[in-house]
């Protein structure tokens, strides 16, 4: 705790002193451009890994970066997402999983958790789609490979869950929202981003074209153009 | 999004290059010493404001840094807390509110939210104790003063909610857990910490005594020594 | 009731007498090939409109052919879907909306329903994504046109909800399940089927190619090929 | 799927062509006289077995024709029932179980289901009254006899559940609603109806007296005449 | 509080001293013969009004003597009922309403309660069947007459809710349980008991025949004799 | 049942006759001064053990005198508490556990209960904090000693749960509510009261000072004086 308190001092002496104008602008409102959803894991530090300042990332963090489908949970995820999109008009969402994720490991020994950590068990049941799909589709995987595929598929499944929220669905349909799938490697500090065209995770620089709009997102307006009943 | 992707590059070139040993140690496990619960607000950046490295803070973030009482919600809060204390053996929790919090403002216009942002409304109902207590106890407050007291009381109320969780209750009773109440000022970058002796929020340096154990926590073992039935 | 009882007689005298062999085969087990999800509306009669015999369609019917996302409801929908796919190994799902649907009309006057028909209100809240998306995306629609687009979008949204179920997600990923979106016109008796390539509803004959596999479904394995992390 | 699509054609060519007037009348509203609640089982086809046209039966179907008590579930059952009685003013309900029902068989191996088909397990827990009562009252039954009594008792128990719904309770009390218990034999195509006087299931023709009102229902107004406090 | 503490003294000096043998027998177990369910109202004191000793009545008390249907609530009612019947083998249940009941009055102004006392509102929604049935069946009642009929019908409706619990259903079917409906008048101290034969509440002495078994209960085994499928 | 009916007679002949004035005063309203929360156990008779008349105690009774945290349950506890404090303006709450409590014994064999008494199991899960804390803090206790400490700690934990209710929190903060922890010994008829100063349960007479206000309560206004942010 003493270390933390000394850190507070250092923050004021360095960052605050050099960002007076920014902090002044942010005193009475925030205008973040990205909703960043990631794991509670201590090795994933959103502002550090994206080299962003205060005011840039609106952040949701829980074990496993899980977003239960609309209506399935009454915790902080739903209301915070709605606030981000509806009140702050954020137009970009990143869901960022990470290597060596304890929550994904937990999925592989759910039954043991039920007795020892019942609340972790209840929470991970929201990722049952991840567990079941990976175990049935990749029966030959094990060890680190299995964790790796769990992490990768889990992010995509949480994005599908995100799409069941009314505000998300509506904004996607109107072309006003993009959702990105990332995986952060806690050892190398590198990020891979999902590329919908190739169904692979690739370095995000590879998606960087001329302007922001052409970064290839997992879900964008193109996916859901208006239905035209005959 | 391009800015974010360039930030990833910068992070690797600077932070990762200079912290190779740390990242290597963290590759296969984490050993954070603090569970840091704070608002999703973009102006609150836990690692920045405490000047901590990756691996130090296990973080939960939602709108309003609200922790519903045990059993009241099935979102990420409960399972993530249990994982932090039970699996990672974290012994210190900080709940950190902040000035100008949009969630606290939302508490003052709940009825309007019910129609426009139903999920935000549902979520903020978990902080009904904060709303009701402040409005009935401070009927003469308004404007920034009212928000300020909402923020301050809300952190203490969430700590009382925290105490209803089995793992929290048990560890507190055994003297193996301390919980701290903080308020972060988004304009000045300063933190105030709750001082249980004086029932005030004061600069945390004022609580810093000779060693870590003597930092005055909101709730510690002293609160709950064993009951001795006659 | 007398009419119904006389109908039972007529059924035995005609259908049963002429389908003795079929009924004998079905006496101890069923092997339906399609899970047919449709509205409770009396004008939608699955076996009649598809000219199918007993034993062919496993049927779920509720007001509005709504499938709440995984975990969002504990009514019959989830368990019945799981039973159909997991126990009966059904590989084709049709969700069939219909013209002039009372449930879709109800979505347009939800607030009035809250007082008069609270359970209908609660149920239709599971289709809030349909209501919100259509009202925000088609603000200029009204009357029959508005109902028509509600019906059409609702079926697609329910299919997205379906995809959040573990067994559905897993089977889709393995290429063992196809989902079709239909709209039945109660006046003309005609069905339109969603065509994913053109984002329109078209007569299903237009999708009939050489063999069953090439009927274009809303969701099939192609949508979800394996993720290949680098 | 091709078979289904061809069936649609056949339906239009035969049924639609010969029922143009009926379909025209039904184009803008429905006036079904019966709410028919039955199992999703493919062998139970309400319109076929009662030889009824489109427009006659408002239908709810789920695995096991289970109606959870009022307040116990938030799936489609409650809202659809309320819509049928409150909006459509239906005055007759049939709950129709059937021989060889997979859901009833599932009740006998619930524990096994918990792991393999968790949603089926959760759903069948709503029929725990059926399971417990039958196993404790008929301990000597087994095989087909046991399934038969489960099916028979289950329908009566679901009717008792129905009676806990506000709209059902109110209409019963006013003598404006009758509820019938049926069992359909998938092999013989015969239906038996519960006779409240003799506590047995008998051929419904035996209940057919001079007019519709005298068909003996399981629950009618007589059951609940006004309480007269002294 | 001082009055209460002095009452404790008086209890020991009078009751305890004169019931030493009874208290000794009860020291290590209880064998109550009746489950008594009544309102929390201070004017209803089960042991006083039935002149019973400690050890005779197992008691559930909440506002309005409401028993939500099986599965509709996770409060103390369900578990306590199950414990009474399953663990203590109690064979008689009394549900006792009372005149001038505040909860029943609350049913008549539910909407006002929603804002001021949200938890009371939520609780009374479990008695929506009472409210709706009485308001629709007795539209001409008002004032004390209306409260009186609410109280009387509410007890019967809660008994119907009781019947949806697995243990209750099973024991009723086996003829091992009887349920009685009482109304206690807080002004006169008199009780009326429901008489199923005449559908009226009458003085319970009128039901007292030769032996205990012949007291006419609301629900007993006769109601649910075994179904005999042909 | 005959014994009960005769008790009703005796109550009228003795108590009612000698308390005509009191019953008259209570005919149209109640003004109890204490909310008394205790176990359903037949050996705990609130009015008897406190020698109080009708009209004095507003009573909640369930198995184990458990109060789930705010939002964790939708049974009678929450609404009844809110009614007591908000509508009746009660300012004193007693939670009274008791020796030899079957619910506390049940906590020690929860897993066995899950199968045999699932509703008891579900209910006792609300006291998981009691179970876990006692088993982890008093690992060397067993038999009667273990039950005794479970009972004693459980009452304190339920009081912490009480504090999460909005109305409780607000009234405590305003100094308008006191909460007392009692344990009743079913064999000796004696009560012990928790003394917050010494963290022990002592005879309540020892807390009786000059006037009512000085009885030492477990939780009172002193606990929660206003927060003064700097
Ligand atoms: Zn993780
Ligand atoms: Zn905030
Ligand atoms: Zn419809
Ligand atoms: Zn079936
Ligand atoms: Zn009452
Ligand atoms: Zn007890």
Image: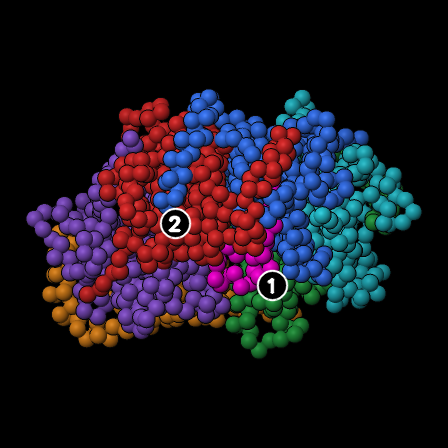
Chain colours: A blue, B red, C cyan, D green, E orange, F purple
Residue E131 in view of the camera: no
Q: Residue at x 46, y 21 (%)?
A: A21
Q: Chain of mark 1?
A: D
Q: Could you tell whether E79 is left or right of B207 in the image?
A: right
Q: Which residue is mark 2?
A: B92
* Magenta stretch encompasses residue D143: no
Does label 1 lie on the same chain as label 2? no
User: Of helix, strand and loop, which one carries label 2?
Assistant: strand
Q: Which residue is mark 1?
A: D115
Q: Secondary structure at mark 1?
A: helix
Residue ranking furthest to the bottom: D140
Main SS class of the magenta portion in the image: helix
Q: Residues within 10 Å of mark 1 (few under 14, many from 20)?
A: few
Please state, as top left, top right, bottom left or bottom right, where the N terminus of chain F lies in the image: bottom left
Classify mark 2: residues with Cα within 10 Å, few (<14), some (14-19) or many (20+). many
The label nearer to you, 2 versus 1, is: 2
**Residue E133, image x, y percentages:** 46, 44
Q: Which residues are magenta?
A: A95-123
Q: Please give the name of the residue rendered at 32% of the width and 38% of the height, measured from the top-left corner.
A: B204
Residue D208: quadrant of the picture: bottom right
């Amino acid at each position: 705790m003493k270390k933390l308190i000394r850190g507070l001092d250092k923050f004021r002496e360095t960052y605050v002193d050099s960002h007076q104008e920014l902090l002044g602008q942010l005193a009475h409102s925030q205008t973040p451009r990205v909703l960043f959803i990631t794991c509670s894991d201590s090795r994933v530090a959103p502002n550090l890994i994206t080299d962003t300042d205060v005011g840039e990332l609106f952040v949701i963090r829980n074990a496993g970066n899980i977003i239960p489908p609309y209506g399935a949970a009454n915790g902080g995820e739903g209301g915070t997402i709605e606030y981000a999109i509806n009140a702050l008009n954020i137009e970009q969402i990143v869901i960022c999983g990470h290597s060596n994720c304890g929550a994904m490991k937990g999925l592989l020994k759910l039954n043991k958790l039920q007795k020892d950590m019942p609340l972790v068990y209840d929470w991970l049941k929201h990722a049952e789609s991840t567990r079941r799909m990976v175990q049935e589709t990749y029966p030959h995987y094990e060890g680190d490979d299995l964790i790796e595929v769990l992490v990768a598929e889990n992010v995509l499944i949480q994005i599908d869950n995100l799409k069941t929220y009314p505000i998300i669905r509506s904004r996607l349909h109107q072309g006003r929202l993009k959702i990105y799938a990332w995986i952060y490697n806690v050892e190398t500090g590198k990020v891979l981003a999902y590329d919908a065209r190739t169904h692979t995770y690739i370095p995000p620089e590879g998606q960087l074209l001329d302007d922001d709009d052409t970064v290839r997102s997992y879900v964008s307006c193109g996916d859901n153009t208006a239905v035209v009943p005959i």
